[in-house]
Amino acid sequence: MTRTKHTPSEGLAIYDPRNNDRIFKLSNSEIWHSRGTELLFFETDDRSRFTNGRWLITLVDLLRDETQPSEIELCVEPSPKCANPKWISDAVSDDKRLLGKLRPHALDDLRSFYDAYAMYGRWVFRGLRSPGQMRSNTAYLPDILTSPESLAFYVEIDLDGMLIGFVRLSPATEGVIDKLAAL
């Protein structure tokens, strides 16, 4: 089931690149089209979903299971006022942001952390296709689309407004559309 329009009660809007086109204007004024790419976009402005740690962990877990990334990177801006969580490896933190990799089996810890600290700002999850590809740059949508090759999935949550992301389609991820629609 592919939806191109939605209301909050419908959940995620899903843009299958074989049938739909999600269009972005990049910071250099170029126009980027999803049609014909391997990137399936999804989004919602339903705050009851993307501010709920349980729902978010279900989404990240689904994307992890479907794409099998080598690592999942987390970036939080601004950085939460707390010590770096032990379940994040290679953590780098300052007042601007917290950046690190989720340790295996860290999703329950992440849920508690998200519920405690996700009041405002931006939270980004990047499923990296190869180990050691930590993306220390701060590219977000739409500019991350200039070089998305290293990403299996991407989820960006602007707590002031919406969740948007993409997952790389392949024969192995064909069932992801129905699973996303069921969220």
Image (spheres, helix red, strand yellow):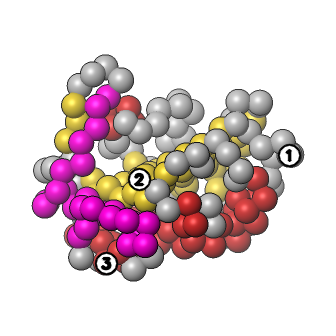
Most foreground residue, 12 or 64: 12
Tell me, yes or no, whether the two marked residues, 1 and 3, touch with CB atoms within 8 Å. Answer: no
Residue 125's mark?
Answer: none
Based on the picture, tell me whether residue 4 belongs to the magenta stretch: yes
Please state which amino acid type lies under the numbered disc 2: Gly
Mark 2–mark 3 Cα distance, whole angstroms, equals 16 Å
In the picture, the quarter occupied by the N terminus is: bottom left
Mark 1–mark 3 Cα distance, whole angstroms, equals 38 Å
Please state which amino acid type lies under the numbered disc 1: Cys
**Looking at the image, can residue 20 be seen?**
yes
> Which segment is the magenta one?
2-26
Residue linked to disc 1: 82
Based on the picture, tell me whether residue 157 belongs to the magenta stretch: no
The residue at the point 54 percent across, 40 percent down is: 134
**Looking at the image, can residue 169 be seen?**
no
Element at label 2: strand
Residue linked to disc 2: 165
Mark 2–mark 1 Cα distance, whole angstroms, equals 27 Å
Quadrant of the image occupied by residue 98: top right
Element at label 1: loop
Number of marks drawn: 3
Residue linked to disc 3: 178
- In the rendered image, the vertical position of residue 147 relative to residue 57, given as above or below: above
